């Protein structure tokens, strides 16, 4: 046409291997091209190749090309869309494949359209409950086009700094020595990712490195992903690919080479971006005006735009914030300005960004201080007037003043007592924190000192302080392998709670209108009891393991793991110990009965579904004590089915197989564990 927006080539003759190449000057205002191919005279489907390309300075050609093979049927058109840039040259190649026999004629058409957005990258106001919409302007720069905008947020981006950055020469100095006697040096960056939910199509990106390979200023780049067992999961380079990551911890190691140390020094704090898809897309409404966006009415529908015509739109995200994102993360998505033409892939898309804001604070209750102050003022003024009106009551006024003075003195005394109690509490917290940092013989002396003994003997000690003291003692005694003292500390904490009261509260169904503060307090006491009973059972389990094995090294990677603040970690730690029940190894029936009683106490307060991870190692150990090896093996294999990467379960499985006498299976599983749980990370 006259404007240079539409081109048609009719009755192009084709035969096997025939190539037709056309060049176009992309008109001003065009942002994408629509290509259509239709054949005639072919009875059977013929295979065609359609390739289009335009170049941009300092960008890879692959970012601006299409290269497709299509099976072309007679009379059925095939459509393609591709992004273009004004004032560039577009090359189009349409060829019949050499092995596609027969001749035909083809009609090829190319149309240029233009829809531009201002700004080109849209930053939405933070938050999904933010009533402030974001304005964008849409302009038609080329041929007439129907605008039908839609937007959504589809991915989240979390940003990480490296845990470590090591710069070192390559191991083979002679091989990596350049002809001009320059050594090639490498930097290895290590990142730790914590994935809370199973994620498919996650991408690990490095904005400082991605998109350039041979033109990159660095010598080479490579990254590897490992799971918590140091098993290699994935390898990537300058163009990150999607990878499926299960729930758990991962380590990402990045390797970059260069002969200049200054180049590598600048990468020591390089940002890693983890892009993961949202479980459910967040809808972003597109409205015709600011008022319509605030009211969430009158969305922008289809709108036909002539060349150089402009329309404004307002974007407002709505919905609930996904639980998988944290404040400071980015939510990303796309804004689509028009629907695909004739089923071709849509290229009229722009990027949306928004920041996850801090979590909303709970709404505070309205203050009644002003009304109470006004009532007090009224009361005081009334009493003043009364004293003036009734001089005969002066004696009563004196008594009232005396009472007020006594009340003020009592209030002052109470404030002093509260202040002294706060000081005493702060001193205790400082003492506990100081003792918790000690190790070895110093820790033993501190735990046996009068300071800790006095704290344990205090009956008026707050339950929160008792829990803190208990956690510190469990951690300390566990590190010293003095598990009997852990049992004593657990018994002390249990003795501070009214078991009958808590059991009576949870023993019956509670009314819906019951005081929530009482329920909250009872729930807290129940959690404290369960924590103490689990610590006690784990300590007894460690004691029996030490008795049987006669070596603290076999018991577990330690008392430290079994005495941490995380109950589930504690349970998993205890389960790794050797739980064989051989009487000649020092475990008596009384010892077994002691552990069974501790286990039964745990089960009285535990929920088998919610606290499954916490009580699983205790169940496994009890099966070994009772020599129920087949049952123990089935139990461990069930854990491996739910989490195949659980190293603790693998070791438990090997232990049970050894107790069963299945040596060949043990050898095979140990060899397999060398692959699943290597000693070190794979080399680059």
Image (spheres, rainbow, N blue to C red):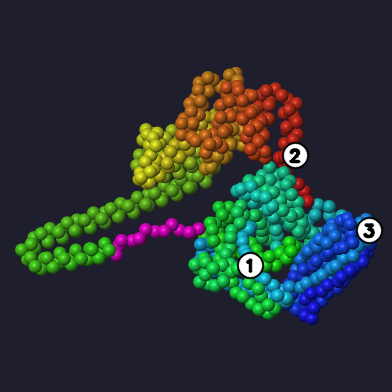
10 Å crowding of disc 1: few (<14), some (14-19), many (20+):
many
Q: Nearer the viewer, residue 653 or 419?
A: 653
Q: Main secondary structure of the magenta part?
A: loop
Residue identified by numbered label 2? 675
Residue 627 spot, x, y in % from top left: 60, 22
Residue identified by numbered label 3? 102
Answer whether residue 365 is magenta in the image. Answer: yes
Give the side of residue 393 with respect to residue 66, left or right.
left
Q: Determine which of the numbered discs, if any, sits on residue 505 in the image.
A: none
State the CA–CA distance, disc 2 to disc 3.
55 Å
The answer to which of marks 2 and 3 sits earlier in the sequence is 3
Which element type, helix, strand or loop, lies under badge 1? loop
Residue at the spot x=66%, y=66% of the render?
Answer: 336
Residue at the spot x=58%, y=28% of the render?
Answer: 621
Task: Report the span colored magenta.
Answer: 359-370
Answer whether residue 442 is magenta in the image. Answer: no
State the CA–CA distance, disc 2 to disc 1.
51 Å
The answer to which of marks 2 and 1 sits earlier in the sequence is 1
The answer to which of marks 1 and 3 sits earlier in the sequence is 3
10 Å crowding of disc 3: few (<14), some (14-19), many (20+):
some
Q: Nearer the viewer, residue 138 or 591?
A: 138
Q: Nearer the viewer, residue 299 or 623?
A: 299
Residue identified by numbered label 1? 149
């Amino acid at each position: 046409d006259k404007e240079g927006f539409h081109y048609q080539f009719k009755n192009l003759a084709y035969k096997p291997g025939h190539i037709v190449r056309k060049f176009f000057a992309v008109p001003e205002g065009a942002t994408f091209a629509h290509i259509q191919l239709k054949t005639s005279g072919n009875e059977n489907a013929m295979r065609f190749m359609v390739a289009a390309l335009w170049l941009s300075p300092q960008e890879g050609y692959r970012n601006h090309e299409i290269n497709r093979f299509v099976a072309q049927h007679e009379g059925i058109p095939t459509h393609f869309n591709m992004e273009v840039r004004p004032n560039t040259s577009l090359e189009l190649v349409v060829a019949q494949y050499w092995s596609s026999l027969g001749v035909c004629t083809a009609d090829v058409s190319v149309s240029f359209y233009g829809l531009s957005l201002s700004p080109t990258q849209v930053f939405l106001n933070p938050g999904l409950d933010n009533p402030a919409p974001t304005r964008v302007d849409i302009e038609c720069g080329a041929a007439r086009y129907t605008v039908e905008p839609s937007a959504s947020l589809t991915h989240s981006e979390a940003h990480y700094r490296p845990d470590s950055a090591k710069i070192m020469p390559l191991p083979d100095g002679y091989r990596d020595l350049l002809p001009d006697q320059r050594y090639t040096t490498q930097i290895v960056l290590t990142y730790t990712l914590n994935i809370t939910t199973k994620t498919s199509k996650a991408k690990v990106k490095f904005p400082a490195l991605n998109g350039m390979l041979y033109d990159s200023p660095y010598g080479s780049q490579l990254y590897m992903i490992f799971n918590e067992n140091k098993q290699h999961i994935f390898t990537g380079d300058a163009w990150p690919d999607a990878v499926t990551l299960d729930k758990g911890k991962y380590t990402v190691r990045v390797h970059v080479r260069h002969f200049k140390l200054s180049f590598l020094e600048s990468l020591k704090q390089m940002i890693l971006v983890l892009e993961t898809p949202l479980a459910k897309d967040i809808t972003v409404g597109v409205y015709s005006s600011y008022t319509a966006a605030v009211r969430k009415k009158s969305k922008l529908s289809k709108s036909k735009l002539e060349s150089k015509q402009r329309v404004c739109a307002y974007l407002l995200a709505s919905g609930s914030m996904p639980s998988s994102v944290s404040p400071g993360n980015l939510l990303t998505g796309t804004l689509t300005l028009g629907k695909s033409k004739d089923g071709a892939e849509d290229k009229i898309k722009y990027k949306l960004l928004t920041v996850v804001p801090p979590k909303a604070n709970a709404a505070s209750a309205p203050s009644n201080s002003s009304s109470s102050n006004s009532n007090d003022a009224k009361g005081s003024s009334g009493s003043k007037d009364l004293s003036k009106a009734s001089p005969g009551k002066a004696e009563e006024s004196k008594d009232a003043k005396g009472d007020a003075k006594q009340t003020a003195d009592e209030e002052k005394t109470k404030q002093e007592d509260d202040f002294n109690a706060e000081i005493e509490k702060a001193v205790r917290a400082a003492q506990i924190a100081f003792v918790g940092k000690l190790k070895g013989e110093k820790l033993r002396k501190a735990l046996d000192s009068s300071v800790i003994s006095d704290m344990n003997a205090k009956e008026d000690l707050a339950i929160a302080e008792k829990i803190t003291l208990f956690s510190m003692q469990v951690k300390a005694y566990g590190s010293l392998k003095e598990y009997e003292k852990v049992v004593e500390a657990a018994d002390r904490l249990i003795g501070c709670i009214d078991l009958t009261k808590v059991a009576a509260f949870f023993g019956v169904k509670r009314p819906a209108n019951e005081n929530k503060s009482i329920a909250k307090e009872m729930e807290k006491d129940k959690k404290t009891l369960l924590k103490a009973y689990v610590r006690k059972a784990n300590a007894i389990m460690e004691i029996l393991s030490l008795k049987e094995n006669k070596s603290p090294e076999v018991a577990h990677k330690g008392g430290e793991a079994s005495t941490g603040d995380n109950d589930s970690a504690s349970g998993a730690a205890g389960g790794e110990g050797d739980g064989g029940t051989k009487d000649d190894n020092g475990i008596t029936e009384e010892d077994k009965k002691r552990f069974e009683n501790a286990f039964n106490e745990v089960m009285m307060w535990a929920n088998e579904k919610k606290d499954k991870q916490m009580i699983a190692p205790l169940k496994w150990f009890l099966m070994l004590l009772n020599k129920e090896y087949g049952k123990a093996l089935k139990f461990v294999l069930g854990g491996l089915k739910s989490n195949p990467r659980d190293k603790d379960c693998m070791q438990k499985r090997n232990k049970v197989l050894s107790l069963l006498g299945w040596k060949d299976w043990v050898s095979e599983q140990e060899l397999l564990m060398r692959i699943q749980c290597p000693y070190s990370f794979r080399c680059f």
